[in-house]
Amino acid sequence: MHSLISKYHATAQAVLWLTLFLSQAAIAQSGGRSMFGQMQGEIDPVTMSMGGFAPVWGPLGLGSAISNPALLEECSQHRWFTGWSKRPAGLQQGGFAMVLPLKRFPEWHAAIGTQFTGTGSMPSTDPFGMETGQTQAGEGVLQASLGHRFSPRLNWGVQTRVVSSYLGSYSAWGAGLDMALRYTDTAQRLGVCLLLHDASIILKDYVYTSAASRFPPVRLNLMLTNELMHLPLRWSLGMQHLQNWNLRYDDPNDPYKTDNLLLGQDSVTKSSRWADLGREAFLHLVFNAELRLSKAIRLRGGYNALQRAEWAFPERSGSSGFTFGIGLFTRRFSVDFGTGAQTLAGRQSSVAFSWNFSPVKP
C-alpha cells in the first residue's frame, strides 16, 4: 500500500513540475496566444458557450476533451464527435474525434481526431492594395489524446498534435501538446484542473529566412467546478493566463480611461495600488454555469473578462465576452449549440453532435 501511494504521489508531482516548468519557460517570450491563429476558435459548443472553458467535473461530450485532455474519461459514454463552427470574416471550422477502445486498461482513455479551418476564396492584393486575383488560407490539425486515472481523486491527460497552415503559396508546420492535471471529489461534487495550453514548436515558418524553429508562449489556466447538491446547477470559476499576470495596458491617450481615483478637495488624482491589482485580477477571470432543466436539456452561459476587455468598444460594448448555449443530452447521443459575440467583427456559433449507439452501461 505504501509503495502504491508513493507511486501516485510521484506521478502527480512529475506532471505538476513539468507543467510549471513549461509555463515559466514562456514568461520571457513574446508573440501570439497560440501557434496558429486560425485554430483559436472553439469547435466544441460546450466549451464555446461557457466562456472558452468546459466544466472540469460532471458528464460532458467528447468535444470538451479536445480543449482539455483530462476530461477524456468524462466523455467515454459518447465515443464519436463531429462539430462545425462559423466564425467572423468568413472563417469556417470543422472537426471530428473518436475514442479508442482500451478494454484491457480501464484506467486509461485515448482518442484521436482532426480539425480544419479555411477562409474560402478571398481577394489577393499587391503591397499597394491593388487586387491581383484570388487566394485562400487555411489550417489543419491531426491530434491524439491520452488520459490516465492514477488515483481515486487524481487523473492527468495529454494531447499531442501536428499542425499545418497555408496562406496562398506560403506554408508552415508545427507540433505541440496540451497537458492537464485534475483533482475530483465525488462526495463534494467538485473538480479542480490545472491546464497547460500550447506547449508548441514551429518546425517550418512561412518565411524561409526566419529561424528554423520557434517556441510560442504557453498558457496556464486553473479551473474549479462544483455542482450544487440541491439544485440542478453546475458552475465553474477559473483564472486564465496565469503565466503572465500583467495583461492590462494603460493608454494615457484613452479618453475612456477611468482607473484613477479622485482624492481630496484639490482634485488630485492618484493611482490606487489595490484598485490596479483588482482590475488586473479581474482580467484573468472566467465564470460559467450550466442549468439542467431536465435529464435531457441543459442551458449554458459564460463570461470571459479578458475577451470583453479586448473585444468591446466603449461606444458599443454589446455582449462581447458573454457566451450562451443549449444542449440535448442522452445516454446515446448529445446535440450542442453555442454562440458568442466578437464585437463589431461578428459572432461565432458552433454546433456539434456526439453519439454512441451502443452506450457503455453506467
Image (cartoon, helix red, strand yellow):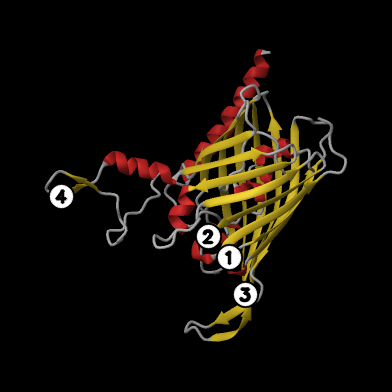
Name the image quarter holding the C terminus. top right
Residue 268: % across, % down: 15, 49
- In the structure shown, which secondary structural element does the residue marked by tag 4 occupy? loop
Mark yes or no: residue 79 visible. yes
Q: Earlier in the sequence, mark 3 or mark 4?
A: 3
Badge 1: few (under 14), some or many (20 or more) residues near its Cα, within 10 Å?
A: some
Give yes or no for contact between labels 3 and 4 (Cβ–Cβ under 8 Å): no
User: Hey, what amino acid is under mark 4?
Assistant: Ser
Q: CA distance from mark 4 to mark 1?
A: 45 Å
Q: Earlier in the sequence, mark 1 or mark 3?
A: 1
User: Hey, what amino acid is under mark 3?
Assistant: Gly
Badge 3: few (under 14), some or many (20 or more) residues near its Cα, within 10 Å?
A: few
Q: Earlier in the sequence, mark 2 or mark 1?
A: 1
Mark 2, residue position: 342
Q: Earlier in the sequence, mark 4 or mark 1?
A: 1
- In the structure shown, which secondary structural element does the residue marked by tag 2 occupy? loop
Which of discs 1 and 3 lies nearer the camera? The answer is 1
Q: CA distance from mark 2 to mark 3?
A: 26 Å
Q: Is residue 313 above or below residue 182?
A: below
User: Hey, what amino acid is under mark 1?
Assistant: Pro
Which of discs 3 and 4 lies nearer the camera? The answer is 4
- In the structure shown, which secondary structural element does the residue marked by tag 3 occupy? loop
Badge 4: few (under 14), some or many (20 or more) residues near its Cα, within 10 Å?
A: few
Q: CA distance from mark 2 to mark 1?
A: 8 Å
Residue 71: % across, % down: 67, 38
User: Hey, what amino acid is under mark 2?
Assistant: Gln
Mark 4, residue position: 267
